[in-house]
Image: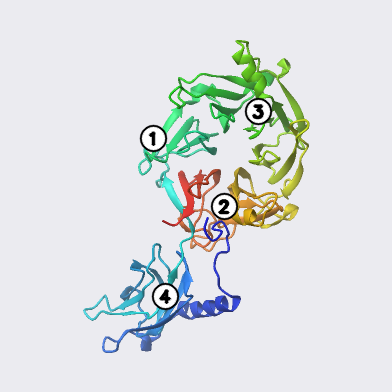
């Protein structure tokens, strides 16, 4: 992540420059319908004398100065680095535009008179310093106007679906495979192959008794997939977590061996401790968190014994409850295993539970972000922050923290579902918005939600995102944009 690419605030302008630029933009935005003196004159030369700011990335607001630009946007073309810029307004001696993507070479050229046979062009004497930055893109999926595109596996550019709330996780062994599990619309488990660039459904819902899939994780050796299911049809014997063994060829299919690992009721999620390997899962019933020693399971199976998954069998124990009954929550364990975040989906806050190395279990949690039952969109510290239905999250190493030799070098990025954005929580308890609009929007339709790709905060919008995963090797986020029916990306501009 060059230049700390995960920082929201990457531009290097002074406040004075920003205010000056804003004033210039205001002038170029002003109504010029009656400005007859500003019309293009083919007998006079077109010149480009300056532009501000001097550097930036895609969708950067840019003001260009010169002469004889006219006042008709349809008669003016601006290119930067050979790429067509979006022209917002023009007024005689200045114009206002947005820097296009891939404007690498930086030449600022204005062409006027394209509607006539008297077109002229002029190029600035200096170049715009184009900076690559993290941007939102679309990997796969489409939503048509009737939202009846259905579910179709296939190449990324043709596949459709992605229509349920769900979670994303990379295969720890086949690291080019991204899995998606869906809570809604009963579609089973999909594999997105980043090398073949295709989507394939690998495990059907029938593999899990056709019930809601709430999370996906893996044993520490990567040989077993762990899927939580949300149901209460068998009361306290309702399957909560399934364990699926990887096939000899390294794949997971409906032919893979599987069995019920733990049964209670109403499980919202399960996670494996990355160091010691025990399993933690929950119940919506009373907000319980349970611990299951995976070594007991593996030893039982290896010795030819029978594994008993029910609560009354004694193979897992309750550690604590989080606060109240009917609280939907998910567990995300820090890569070091020293603590976990408990994301309370329907009560809009995040807890932290610290790991006890002596007992090898998590302790009762405490609030680190947001406030129970108080939703909203507020960047802030601790209980002063507000979120609205946070969903899946992932830990991402921050190189700045590594350089500073901090004890904790990971930020926690999560989908803020009803705020239609991606947020992150720092180790210091600060919540910030990383991508998307939150509940305020500068978009023409006035909505915080949408499907636009581009600049993280100025342009891009999401529509009820739920799943998120991060690939450190490519510095890329993958987001399940549920209502947008897409898999979105956040990555360095190519």
Location of mark 2 (residue):
421
**Mark linked to residue 33:** none
Front position among marks 2 and 4: 2
Front position among marks 1 and 3: 1
Front position among marks 1 and 4: 1
Label 3 neighbourhood size at 10 Å, few (<14), some (14-19), many (20+)?
Answer: many
| 3D distance between C-alphas at marks 2 and 4 | 29 Å
In front here: 95 or 57?
57
Q: Secondary structure at mark 2?
A: strand
Of callouts 1 and 2, the N-terminal one: 1
Location of mark 3 (residue):
266
Q: Secondary structure at mark 1?
A: loop
| 3D distance between C-alphas at marks 1 and 3 | 30 Å
Of callouts 3 and 2, the N-terminal one: 3
Q: Position of residue 113 (x, y in %)?
A: 28, 79
**Mark linked to residue 89:** 4
């Amino acid at each position: 992540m060059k230049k700390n690419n995960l920082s929201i605030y990457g531009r290097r302008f002074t406040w004075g420059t920003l205010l000056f630029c804003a004033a210039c933009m205001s002038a170029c935005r002003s109504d010029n319908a009656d400005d007859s003196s500003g019309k293009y004159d083919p007998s006079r030369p077109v010149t480009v004398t300056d532009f501000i700011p001097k550097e930036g990335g895609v969708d950067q607001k840019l003001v260009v100065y010169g002469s004889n630009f006219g006042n008709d946007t349809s008669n003016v073309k601006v290119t930067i680095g050979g790429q067509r810029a979006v022209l917002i307004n023009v007024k005689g001696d200045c114009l206002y535009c947005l820097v296009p993507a891939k404007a690498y070479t930086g030449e600022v050229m204005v062409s006027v008179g394209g509607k006539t046979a008297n077109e002229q062009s002029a190029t600035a004497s200096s170049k715009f310093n184009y900076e690559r930055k993290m941007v939102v893109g679309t990997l796969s999926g489409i939503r048509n106007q009737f939202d009846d595109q259905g579910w179709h596996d296939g190449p990324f550019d043709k596949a459709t679906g992605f229509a349920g709330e769900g979670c994303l996780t990379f295969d720890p062994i086949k690291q080019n495979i991204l899995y998606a599990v869906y809570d809604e619309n009963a579609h089973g488990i999909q594999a997105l192959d980043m090398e073949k660039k295709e989507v394939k459904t690998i495990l059907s819902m029938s593999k899990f008794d056709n019930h809601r899939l709430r999370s996906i994780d893996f044993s520490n050796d990567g040989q077993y997939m762990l899927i939580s299911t949300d149901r209460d049809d068998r009361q306290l014997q309702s399957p909560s977590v399934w364990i699926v063994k990887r096939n000899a060829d390294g794949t997971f299919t409906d032919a893979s061996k599987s069995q019920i690992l733990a049964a209670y009721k109403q499980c919202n999620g399960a996670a494996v401790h990355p160091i010691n390997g025990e399993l933690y899962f929950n119940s919506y019933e009373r907000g319980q968190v349970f611990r299951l020693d995976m070594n007991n399971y593996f030893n039982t199976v290896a010795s030819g014994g029978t594994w008993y998954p029910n609560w009354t069998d004694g193979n897992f124990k309750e550690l604590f409850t989080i606060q109240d009954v009917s609280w939907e929550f998910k567990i995300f364990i820090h890569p070091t295993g020293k603590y976990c975040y408990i994301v309370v989906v329907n009560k809009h806050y995040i807890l932290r539970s610290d790991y006890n190395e002596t007992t090898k279990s998590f302790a009762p949690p405490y609030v680190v972000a947001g406030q129970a039952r108080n939703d909203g969109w507020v960047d802030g510290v601790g209980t002063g922050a507000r979120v609205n239905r946070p969903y899946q999250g992932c830990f991402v190493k921050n190189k700045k923290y590594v350089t500073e030799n901090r004890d904790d070098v990971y930020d926690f990025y999560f989908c803020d579902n009803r705020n239609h954005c991606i947020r992150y929580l720092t180790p210091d308890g600060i919540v910030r918005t990383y991508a998307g609009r939150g509940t305020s929007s500068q978009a023409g339709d006035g909505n915080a939600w949408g499907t636009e790709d581009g600049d993280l905060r100025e342009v891009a919008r999401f529509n009820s995102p739920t799943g998120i995963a991060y690939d450190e090797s490519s510095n890329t986020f993958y987001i399940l944009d549920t209502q947008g029916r897409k898999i979105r990306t956040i990555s360095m501009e190519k």
